[in-house]
């Protein structure tokens, strides 16, 4: 059974930084594509970033390219999202998700099998 637990959210001023962490349980983490998604109030959940099982390949939403960086540590069963130059539009609940083993980083959200409970990120102007 896979469990994902996000942490690191909070309140930050525009232009600031936050680092989100996602701790994963289970034996399949090190071979799974991992992703970060977010959902703002009144909006649908949207893709933020994804990383391949080895960390070699990454994919980002256009809205966060150059500001956010996804990384992983397979020895610690963890995936991270470093968020810099935050904007009020980045305010949302951020979710970590585990996808299929050895999958591409451009898979749709429906291909992700497991989801965390989310962590709130609020960016004030």
Image: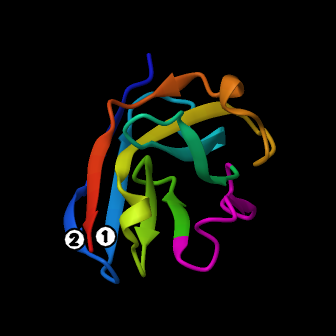
**Looking at the image, residue 3 lies above or below residue 97:** above
Q: Position of residue 24 (x, y in %)?
A: 40, 38
Circle 1: element type? strand
Work out whether residue 102 or residue 105 is closer to the camera in this orientation and state it: 105
Q: Which quarter of the rendering shows the N terminus?
A: top left
**Looking at the image, residue 106 lies above or below residue 100:** below
Query: Which stretch appears magenta?
Result: 53-68
Q: Position of residue 107 (x, y in %)?
A: 77, 38
**Looking at the image, residue 50 lies above or below residue 3:** below
State the separation of the CA atoms marked 2 and 1. 8 Å
Is residue 45 shown left or right of residue 4?
A: right
Dominant secondary-structure state across the stretch colored magenta: loop
Residue at image point 42% right, 81% down: 85
Residue at image point 64% right, 72% down: 65
Labels 2 and 1 touching (C-beta < 8 A): yes
**Tag 2 residue:** 12
Circle 2: element type? strand
Dot 1: within a 10 Å radius of its alpha carbon, few (fewer than 14), some, or many (20 or more) residues? some
Is residue 45 shown left or right of residue 104?
A: left
Work out whether residue 56 or residue 115 is closer to the camera in this orientation and state it: 115
Tag on residue 18? 1
Q: Which quarter of the rendering shows the C terminus?
A: bottom left
Work out whether residue 79 or residue 125 is closer to the camera in this orientation and state it: 125
Viewer-side label of 2, 1? 2
Dot 2: within a 10 Å radius of its alpha carbon, few (fewer than 14), some, or many (20 or more) residues? some
Residue at image point 48% right, 59% down: 73
């Amino acid at each position: 059974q896979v469990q994902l637990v996000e942490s690191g959210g909070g309140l930050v001023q525009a232009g600031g930084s936050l680092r989100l962490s996602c701790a994963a349980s289970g034996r399949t983490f090190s071979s799974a594509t991992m992703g970060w998604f977010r959902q703002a109030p009144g909006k649908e959940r949207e893709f933020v970033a994804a990383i391949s099982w080895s960390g070699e390949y990454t994919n980002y939403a256009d809205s966060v390219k150059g500001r956010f960086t996804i990384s992983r540590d397979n020895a610690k069963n963890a995936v991270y999202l470093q968020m810099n130059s935050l904007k009020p539009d980045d305010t949302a609940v951020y979710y970590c998700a585990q996808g299929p083993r050895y999958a591409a980083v451009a898979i749709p959200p429906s291909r992700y099998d497991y989801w965390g409970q989310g962590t709130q990120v609020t960016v004030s102007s």
